[in-house]
Image (cartoon, rainbow, N blue to C red):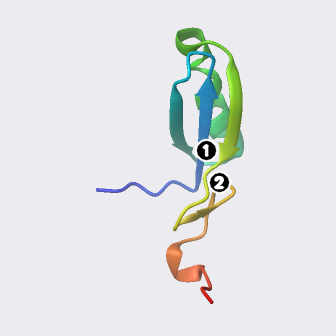
Amino acid sequence: MKVLYPWKMIGRYADDEEIEVGGFDEEDCMTRLISKIEKHGDLVWYSGVSDEDYVAGEYIGRENFIYD
């Protein structure tokens, strides 16, 4: 089952681990990413997820995308 959060972000750490987190808003996602620094090292890159349900981290639902 796929869980759809209002926001989804991804981060890469100093140990090359990439972790995707979901949350209620961007701040919630960043808090979750930051909480993993102790285990994985510095957060070297992060971004909002863009896929069939998200644009720049914010959920919009695939039914709202317009395809040409």
Quadrant in which residue 2 is drawn: bottom left
Residue drawn 51% across the image and 75% down it: 62
Residue 49 numbered tag:
none
Q: CA distance from mark 1 to mark 2?
A: 6 Å
Q: Is there CB contact under 8 Å for labels 1 and 2? A: yes
Residue drawn 56% across the image and 22% down it: 16
Type of the residue with mark 1: Met
Determine whether the residue tagged by mark 1 lies in a helix, strand or loop. Answer: strand
Give the number of callouts. Answer: 2
Residue 57 numbered tag:
2
Type of the residue with mark 2: Gly
Q: Nearer the viewer, residue 33 or 25?
A: 33
User: Quarter holding the C terminus?
Assistant: bottom right
Q: Position of residue 54 (x, y in %)?
A: 59, 62
Residue drawn 61% across the image and 44% down it: 9
Determine whether the residue tagged by mark 2 lies in a helix, strand or loop. Answer: loop
Examine the rendered structure and indicate whether residue 9 appears above or below residue 60.
Answer: above
- Residue at image mark 1: 9
Quadrant in which residue 56 is drawn: bottom right
Residue drawn 62% across the image and 39% down it: 29
Badge 1: residue crowd in 10 Å (few <14, some 14–19, many ≥20): many
Examine the rendered structure and indicate whether residue 16 appears above or below residue 61.
Answer: above
Badge 2: residue crowd in 10 Å (few <14, some 14–19, many ≥20): many
Q: Position of residue 22 (x, y in %)?
A: 53, 44
Q: Position of residue 61 (x, y in %)?
A: 53, 72
Examine the rendered structure and indicate whether residue 17 appears above or below residue 25.
Answer: above
Name the residue at the bottom extreme: 68
Query: Horizontal placement of 3 versus 64: left or right?
Result: left
Query: Horizontal placement of 56 versus 64: left or right?
Result: right
Examine the rendered structure and indicate whether residue 42 appears above or below residue 23.
Answer: above
Quadrant in which residue 1 is drawn: bottom left
Name the residue at the left extreme: 1
